[in-house]
Image (cartoon, grey):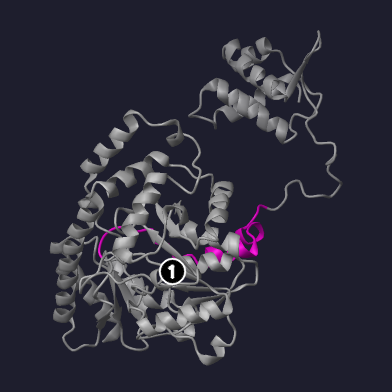
Amino acid sequence: MRSFIVADYLLLQLKKSAGLPRNQQIYRLLRQAILERLLPAATRLPSSRDLAAQLGISRNTVLFGYEQLLAEGYLETRGGGGTHVTDTVPELLGAPQAGAARKPAPPTVRSALSRRGRSLVAQAGAAQQQWGAFVPGVPDVTQFPHKTWSALQSRIWRNPPVSALTYGVGGGCQPLREALANYLKVSRSVNCVPEQIVITSGIHQSIDLCMRLLSDPGDAAWVEDPCYWGARNLLLVSGLQVHPIGLDAEGICPRPAQLKRPPRFIFVTPSHQYPLGMVMSLARRRMLLEYARQHGCWIIEDDYDSEFRYGGRPLASLQGMDRDQRVLYMGTFSKTMFPGLRLGYMVLPEVLAPAFVTGMEELYRSGQMPLQATMAAFIEEGHFNAHIRRMRLLYGARLDLLQQAIRSQFPDDRVRAAGSDAGLHLTLHLPPHCDDEAVARSALALGIAVRPLSRYYYRAARASPGLVLGYACVASERIAPAFAQLALAIRMHIS
């Protein structure tokens, strides 16, 4: 490119590059021309004075572009010989061969992602809408005592220790581990000391850490069918062979043929099965613990919303019955506090706890110590228990309102509610052969967000139609009118 051609090229392109300062435009356009070999190596550029005159702009504007390109290695100056384009083509690549395509084909999702990545994206279940009627699993964050939380956080930030501002060590903030150990002993009959607790960012990270430390590709895992899609996907992307196990009124119910092939992991939600809502019976719990003892299985207990029980006291944990250190207990503050907090915890068998502390530090570089310290104070000073008691009353009242709305809209029992004495959701069973995904789409068009029950099953052929409804984040006065809208969508597909 001779100097007048460089000027013509810049004049043409400058008209298309409005929105950036002129000096930035000069720099970017020259860089692009060099990268695309419109300006090949050793090309001499016009002097900044000449180029500025041809473009009708100030010399300083051109100088900015030249100096930036010199600093980045695109240009070089030769004593008395002007400014030249440097040779930036890597030696290993060399010049393009004759007949070769100038540019490779742009990547596609299929070509870019691994098999594991493609599987994860294809089976993803996270919804874009995380608030409103009837989004499952979301608490009423508008009722959170943020002034109390803010005061505790301000107190901690006034004089934070150095340990609160550097990387976390030891499995998390020690006061939080101590507060949790005391709380879980009383509320969930969990047998633990603070050293068995590791603080995580939630159930997902807890499961991920378990898989990284305890599993090898090809290991078998039993999951309830249906179950929480997030947990199942984490097992799948970890390379495990996932075996769906059916449910009955007592919880997970492996068949005799399945019992003959012991898995490495058994993933369960015994206190409030997600999404169907049944509680695992005492007999089934004892059977599961004995089976794990005999065969060396690890039981992963997801105790995601056990604090909210409306027909009596919360049930004791499976971990509290374990005498053989086979249960890894997981909890989260997402349901009791607010999901954006991103705090969870694991209670580990004593033999595993040191390795998990090391794994947490090595893989995730845990931190957020001021946040964890605030949570510890929130528990220790009684605010946590008070908040749970208040929310339990509120959610229980909202559950009653939703049950009344269901009976009012469907008195003939064509639509049946289940799992309705605990948690933040209930499951609505639809008539056989009803397309619950179509119902969910119709509901969304009316401004109502529900999850189709069939999406929670591992195998579509075994899926039962239904809807998973969250009631916690719906204002009480909105429950009846919102369900009336949902009933319209349901009738479109069952009449």
Q: Residue at x 34, y 86 (%)?
A: 249
Q: Is residue 360 above or below residue 236?
A: above
Residue 129 on the magenta segment: yes
Q: Is residue 136 visible?
A: no
Q: Quadrant of residue 23?
A: top right
**Rendering coords of residue 135 (x, y %):** 30, 64
Q: Quadrant of residue 43?
A: top right
Q: Residue furthest top?
A: 80
Relative side of 82 to 98, left or right: left
Q: Is residue 423 above or below residue 143?
A: below
Residue 221 in magenta stretch = no
Residue at the far bottom in the pictured view: 256
**Which amino acid does the dot numbered 1 rest on?**
Glu
User: For mark 1, what is the residue?
Assistant: 301
Q: Residue at x 19, y 78 (%)?
A: 406
Q: Which residues are magenta?
A: 106-133
Residue 347 shown left or right of residue 183 in the figure: right
Circle 1 packing at 10 Å, graded few (<14), some (14-19), many (20+), is many
Quarter occupied by residue 69: top right
* Residue 224 drawn at (x, y percent): 45, 78
Could you say which is closer to the camera, residue 182 or residue 462?
Answer: 182
Q: Nearer the viewer, residue 192 or 104?
A: 192
Q: Position of residue 254 (x, y in %)?
A: 48, 86
